[in-house]
Image (spheres, coloured by chain):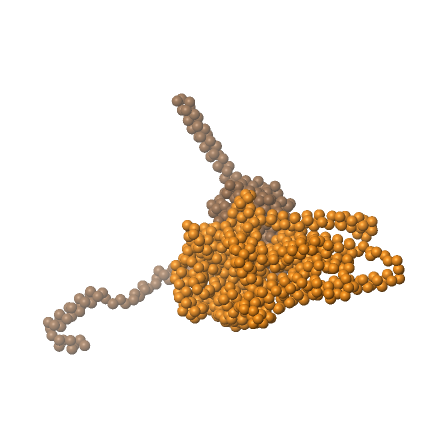
Amino acid sequence: MGLLSDPNRRRALISLLTRLNSPICVVCYMAGVAWFMGLAFEPFTLRTYMSENAMGSTMVEERFPAGERALTTGREFSAHKKKAGGMPVDWLVKTMQARGLEVFTQRFSRKLPFPDENKERYMVKGTNVYGILRAPRAPRTEALVLSAPCTPGDSNNQAVGLLLGLAQYFRNQIYWAKDIIFLVNEHDLIGMQAWLEGYHHTNTTGMDWSPLQGRGGSIQAALSLELSSDVITSMDLVLEGLNGQLPNLDLANLFYAFCQKIGVLCTIQGKLQRNDWDSVSGYSHSVQTMMLMVMKQASGRPWGDHGLFLRYHIEAASIKGINSFRQYKTDVTTIGRLLEGMYRKLNNLLEPFGLLLTDYMLILTLLLHLTVVQALDLWVQLATPPPRTEDGITDKEQVRHTYYFRVLSVLTPLVISHLTGVALYTLPIQFQEMAVEQFPVSETEAVVLTAIGVYTAGLALPHNTHRLLSGEGTEQGWRVLKLVAVLYLAVLLGCTALINFSLGFILALTLVPVAAFVTPHVPKVLSAFILVILSPACTLLFSVFFFQELQELPVSFQEGWLLYLSVISQGILDHFLYGSLVYPLIALLVYPCWLLFWNILFWK
Amino acid sequence: PPIVLFYVEFERKCRSHVSLLCCHASCFGDEDNAGQFFSSGHTNNWAVLVCTSRFWFNYRHVANTLSVYRSVKRLGIPDSHIVLMLADDMACNHRNPKPATVFSHKNMELNVYGDDVEVDYRGYEVTVENFLRVLTGRLPPSTPRSKRLLSDDRSNILIYLTGHGGNGFLKFQDSEEISNVELADAFEQMWQKRRYNELLFIIDTCQGASMYERFYSPNLMALASSQVGEDSLSHQPDLAIGVHLMDRYTFYLLEFLEDIHPASKTNMNDLFKVCPKSQCVSTPGHRTDLFLRDPGSVLITDFFGSVRKVEITMETINLTDPINPVNGELQIRKYSYVDQLPVSEIIHQKPKQKDWHPPDGFILGLWTLILLVFFKLYGMKHLKHIF
């Protein structure tokens, strides 16, 4: 007889499971965390190894000569930008046409759900200008993109100048097999989103844009350039995109290989590559780098203009030129050569970059194992037959009655938690006007404070839920609820990790212990406190402080709180502007799940 | 010192003796040479050159094949006897900064594509099936002659393969493979159909030696650029074009072939020494156990060139007596040619009429002067008489 169908063996297995429940949970959790820390031994270190055959065996000689001319163009751009008070569309169109590109413009406009205090904008209107360099002999099936943002003020002028200089140099070569699109986008991410939506004929965020008149082929790779000084000391590579997506690491390795060849310092997360992982300081350095990357990914924000390309499976990265106080400076001609080399290598690509799957799933399965073990344990407890009453006839009725009552007692908390989640998602935006009238706060603050208010109001729910229910909840009731909640959490975190591993990991780290130990019988005050500390909102608060520490810019509590408020408002804006999934995920799914556990704690 | 003198004297004597011997030897050598000259047994040469890769980053495989093609043509094998199979997507590739060229040496010294390359199987026609059909001759009747290997039992065939390979297989155009067993069986089919006299098989891929492990037909000699478990490496990158131009083994093979001319007497043992480990990094290998002749007596030009040979026959042919005319029975009409050079007419011919030339300017001037003086002296009225 099989293992599970033999009653004797089954009973033995069940008793084993029940006895070892807590040790297994603890071991799984620790193993998961330890494995994650072990990853830091070789975190996202850039190597010169390429897995793409088409790019590995080619090497080119870069010959871009016109760095000074690029700087002059940048200064002209800056002057025209000041005169036009925004994007100098006509000058850009004329200059790009003079370089032999096919030039097109795109208008877009968007009204934000509430004013953005970080960037000080509410009604956004702008124009994107892009020029297409057609491949001389190839069919127009593929394209590469080089973009530079047009920011108000004095920044990124050199980037636009270099872009135009490269356009002129590239136009004179005959070996391009793909179209190259030179894009100058206004209002950084909003403009980029409008352009991408227009290019791919999708409209997911409700933005208003004019259709694109000219198009290249399907985009294979994109680079976004940010350069605000005439000389630089290092180049920073930014990989994190929307919803924590990363481009194929071959792109990062390519960049690193070129930096090494040309002799430019290359940093990632603002930190240099170190080779001494064995020493303590080396290890802590790499742990820091990895934690920075995890936090940036978990926030789901695009950290550069490239972040929006990843959704369309276009490998993209942002390159930032940094001018710090090092001795060795690199000029614009060298940067131009680096970009020329990269584009020549990308030109040789024959197929789209492959999809790289990492082994992070193992870590997550370890962490989630214990939820599954918990669920099994609960199921076992529920499966033990109820104590027999003396009256045999009313047994069946009682069984039916208890069954019906059990379902209701589980369903009610579920429904109410999810309604609270929906309230958290919709109320802040809907009632911002009412809040502004009532209280002396700005719209942004109104939205954020409403969100926090709804969140805290949810904490009072358990008492109200029980008033709704006509009887008392039974011993069995909370077990069923916990079973459902634990399984729900496991599925939720598993799915989140597939989309955004870092977010899934951080949520698992905090919520899984909650799931493990919460029962109505633990000391109420202490567990309530721990539960609140481990809730998503507090996790976010601590992450903000931790993030600032990692970046070596520690903040005081006051500043930290303001930063926290702005993080929430940016998260909500990201969702409405670019379709980031973090805010709806937390509001509609994670928060109700946490509320279920809160309900269990206060079960009567 | 006397010992040295004695030694010198001895050497001198020896040398004279040796030179005498050499004289004799050379006399015998001529006959030997003659014997050797006719001992290979083949009357025509064929070459099948295959490049099994496509795509821009496999530039070097096409350059390899085209370089061997050039050498083989230079040494005498005509296009009609060469079956060249290439993907041919290098010269006109969009990424080629020098369109219509394929270079084999950096700094663009030598364009092996030129303007007289005849590719018989190009693009997607280079498949395992087509290659095997060419070797075995099982082609549909509509196949043109340029795509056929029309060899017979007196043909020496050179087969050159290059591309990406592994242990026991060779990859064709990134989509299929040919295994060493299939290749060995194809050669056996060729042997049984008497499609070759001797066959030289050269392969320049990673783990190339695995491809000739399974041969079992007679008269096959094989060379490979690397042993099993080793990779064949590429030689020189060109920074302007952006790719590696040649593989090491073929590069040194070509250097070796540059010294061969149609009358060379270099033999196969020298070919086996091409590209030692110090230059090639991989260890080239060869296999001669199936070959009936000693490799030292096999000339390079037996496979790489197309040396026209004359067959001396020792048999005598009886020329029969001329036909005796039977008297009276046969009317023999005599024919004669028309006189090609009618001498009699030439000797008695009239002198050719010369073209009239106007008199020399000087004489003309002189006569005009005389006339003018005459008329000046004797008055113009005499002019009336003339005109």
Residue A256 % position (x, y) = 50, 52
Q: Residue furthest top?
A: B2
Question: Quick one: A63 or A522, which is closer to the camera?
Answer: A522
**Chain letter corresponding to the colour brown:** B
Placement of the C terminus of chain A among the 4 image quadrants: bottom right
User: Which chain is drawn using orange?
Assistant: A
Q: Quadrant of residue A75?
A: bottom left
Res B338 quadrant in image:
bottom left
The answer to whether residue A97 is seen in the rendering is: no
Residue at x 70% of width, y 60% of height:
A599
Q: Position of residue A516 (x, y in %)?
A: 69, 53
Residue A7 visible in image: yes
Number of dots carrying numbers: 0
Q: Nearer the viewer, residue B250 or A5?
A: A5
Residue B27: x, y in percent?
Answer: 49, 37
Front position in the image: A130 or B359: A130
Image x and y of residue B217, in percent: 64, 46
In the image shown, does B317 or B260 lie closer to the viewer?
B260
Q: A270 left or right of A28?
A: left
Which residue occupies 53% across, 46% down? A282
Residue at image position (68%, 59%) is A598
Instruction: Identify the residue at horizontal 41%, vertical 63% (top origin).
Output: A74
